[in-house]
Image (cartoon, rainbow, N blue to C red):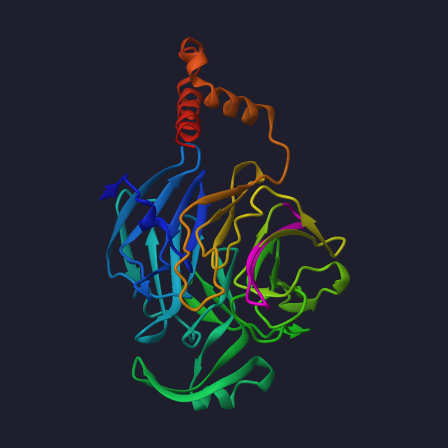
Amino acid sequence: SAERTAPASRLERSGHSAFIDDNTLFVFGGYQVIAGEDVMLPSNEIWLCDLDSGMWERRTIVGEKPPEVCGFCGANVRGTFYVFAGCNENGYTNKMYSVDLTQPSFSWRRIQGAKGTAPSPRNSHSCWVHRDRLIYFGGYGCKTVGEMQNTPAANFVIEELSWAVIENTLFRCWGWNNEVNVFDTHAAAWSSPAVRGSLPTPRGCHASALLGNKGYITGGVESAHLDMFCLDLDTWTWTQIDVSRSGSPLGRTMLTMTSVSDHRLFMYGGLGMDGNTLSDAWWFDTREKTWSQVTHLHQDKPRVCHTACLGSDDDVVVFGGSRDMRILLDTHHCGDVLVFQTQPYSLCRLCEDFIGKHAGRFDKQLKWLPSRMRSKIHKRAAFFSAA
């Protein structure tokens, strides 16, 4: 079923997942704070925003739904949306679910019987999608005593020792990891490639992005400045990129990083080491290995636990998150869409926006346009009218 009304309070969220397909922003999951308590948002729904018109639509998802968790990873592979791991008040999970969003009606399916060994339960990990594989990195979670005996000390930093039973398995050790785990969506199989090189320190709440066959990660550790690591997804070799600290962004967690061209990454927001929610944006040039700060129109909109996706015309589309996490009682969740223009718009885009802003002047001429273009102009008119 579908619902086309979207009260702001229902859209406000942090810790969600989002992606863009055909200029539609898909938003799933996350949490709000209600009466001082974290409340996980329903997993039987997904929200769609037409970025041309700004109109929201809620779609119901039936089937065997995932548990309502935070810190999960969501990823889109050719129209199928995958959700893996996360945690809630009942504990941590390493279950995976999928839903085919190309179908007229949406239905969850729990992925069971996959070959190989699934990663241990975790949250705050990240995911690259490469050649229809889901490649997960890092996060915080738990391991059994037996798993710890087979895990090098450099791959798992123990933060706590406490017993927990998850899916009839007794876990003992809790902490951060720097593992790489791969799920092949065609073969329905897990694998753990043997990585080499300069491994990142174990971490979670970091940012990741994909450029070609290379996965990049930054942040998620206590450091004065952001680091940058690159994993070659063909050779499974890690490289730490040597960046001058004098021109680097401050260290932070819960930030976003978005690939915009074949050599540029766009970083925005996050929670600074001083506890402040940040609103700065930066470019990272993978060829020059340099950071450069971005001047933008959203300096008054700090964000943490938000999402950022690449939209049309290389816009970076940021949604949700919290605008202030400096206090333990966090109630400042957002439900707005921020658009960062990263390049000059085409003449066609400029014309569409101009006519949309002044649609009343062009009533007669709009009838002369092809139906598809006329529909686009009507959507832009609705967008600017609402704004």
Q: Nearer the viewer, residue 331 or 348?
A: 331
Q: Nearer the viewer, residue 95 or 303?
A: 303
Quadrant where the image shows the N terminus: top left
Direction from residue 305 to residue 65 in the image, left or right: left
Is residue 306 shown in magenta? no
What x and y, as percent, mark residue 56? 34, 40
Direction from residue 346 to residue 168 in the image, left or right: left
Give the residue at x 51% y 67%.
205
Q: Which residues are magenta?
A: 261-278
What x and y, as percent, mark residue 85? 39, 68
Residue 312 versus residue 44 in the image, above or below: above
What x and y, as percent, mark residue 59? 28, 46
Is residue 269 shown in magenta? yes
Q: Is residue 244 visible?
A: no
Q: Nearer the viewer, residue 345 or 63?
A: 345
Give the residue at x 53% y 77%.
177
